[in-house]
Amino acid sequence: MSLPLERLSAVVTGAGRGLGRAEALELGRLGAAVVVNDYGRPGRDGSGEASATPAEEVAAEIRKAGGRAVAHTGDVADHEQARELVESAVSEFGKLDILVNNAGILRDRMVFSMSEDEWDSVIRVHLKGHFNTTHFASVHWRARSKAAGAAVYGRIVNTSSEAFLAGSAGQPNYAAAKGGIVGLTTSTALALAKYGVTANAICPRARTRMTEDVFAGFAEPEDGLDPLAPEHVAPLVGYLASPAAARVNGQLLVVHGGMVAIVERPRVAAKFDSGQDTFTYDELDGLLTPHYADRPAGETFAAAEVLGLKRG
């Protein structure tokens, strides 16, 4: 019996640990040949000496299970190294079919305490890293489509976060980057659809190095699979990468612990029309102030509340 991703090749970034590792293993289990990318720095803030070990260990694990995999240790936030990553999939496996963007770091700080470098470094790895690999993968798919005179197979799965949906007071850089990734995803989905490529984003909730503080109060169960295990997220990535998800494009999905929620695009909650040529301050005061009168001071809109989810 053939596997869903048989004869397809994939790149997974940030795949040496945590979510990326689980996703790379799942794609390999489903039959894809995988380029396991990880820069290999031990600190979740991107600090420490780069190491090939994390990527090589995951690639070896896929091969041991009977799959095909190679390791790549480049920095996806570096434009040239991202190009080399995409080219490595083409040179190793003949083409690239699936791109899973997962690489990221944290530099948490309140907005009034955050330094320029803390802002720039997180935006660079998350948002620019997603753009870099997406750019070179889309160049590859567009060229193949033009050469064939027909659509090709392409899947992009990007990693956003509920920090973008619900806000995260100590992560203005991370929340902004994850919101930007959603915008990049929907734009990419529109641009590449005619070439046969889909692009979707997920907001995963899982226990990893990146979230060790968030879930510090939630102990792992003594028996059974941890509800916060990355293995709950990986099957959705496998599905979105598969032919079965051909009609899923430009979507945002929240996933954790055996639950998947499809997030709608923002909808208008209320609408006010001016009774004259243009609004005046007094007219807006008379319309908007009563609308928000029952909301406690300082409360913000949290999309996660609409989803019936607690913030993660």
Image (spheres, helix red, strand yellow):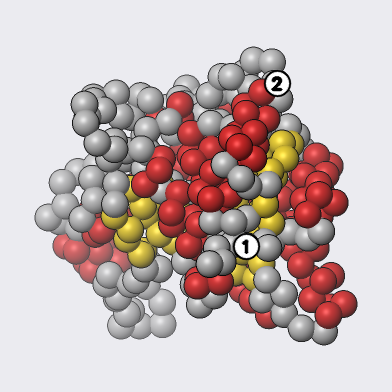
* Residue 15 in which image quadrant: top right
Report the amino acid beneath label 1.
Glu
Image position of 85 (left or right of 291): right
In the image, residue 72 lies at what x, y percent? Answer: 74, 36
Give whichever of discs 1 and 2 has the lower sequence position: 1
Report the amino acid beneath label 2.
Ala
Look at 85% across and 51% down and name the residue there: 91
Where is the C terminus found, in terms of image quarters?
top left
Near mark 2 (Cα within 10 A), the count class, few <14, some 14-19 or many ≥20, is: some
Question: Is there a contact, CB below 8 Å, between mark 1 and mark 2?
Answer: no
Residue in front for this viewpoint, 243 or 264: 243
Look at 48% across and 34% down and name the residue there: 18
Near mark 1 (Cα within 10 A), the count class, few <14, some 14-19 or many ≥20, is: some
**91 versus 185 height, above or below:** above
**Residue labelled with disc 2:** 50
Asked whether residue 60 appears in the rendered view, the answer is: yes
Residue extending furthest toward the front: 1
Q: How many marks?
A: 2
Image position of 222 (left or right of 88): left
**Residue labelled with disc 1:** 6
Residue extending furthest toward the top: 48
* Residue 151 in which image quadrant: bottom right
Quote the CA–CA distance across marks 1 and 2. 32 Å
Dot 2 falls on a residue whose secondary structure is loop
Look at 36% across and 52% down and name the residue there: 255
**Which numbered disc, 1 or 2, marks the residue closer to the eye?**
1
Dot 1 falls on a residue whose secondary structure is loop
In the image, residue 142 lies at what x, y percent? Answer: 79, 70
Image position of 109 (left or right of 188): left
Asked whether residue 117 appears in the rendered view, the answer is: no
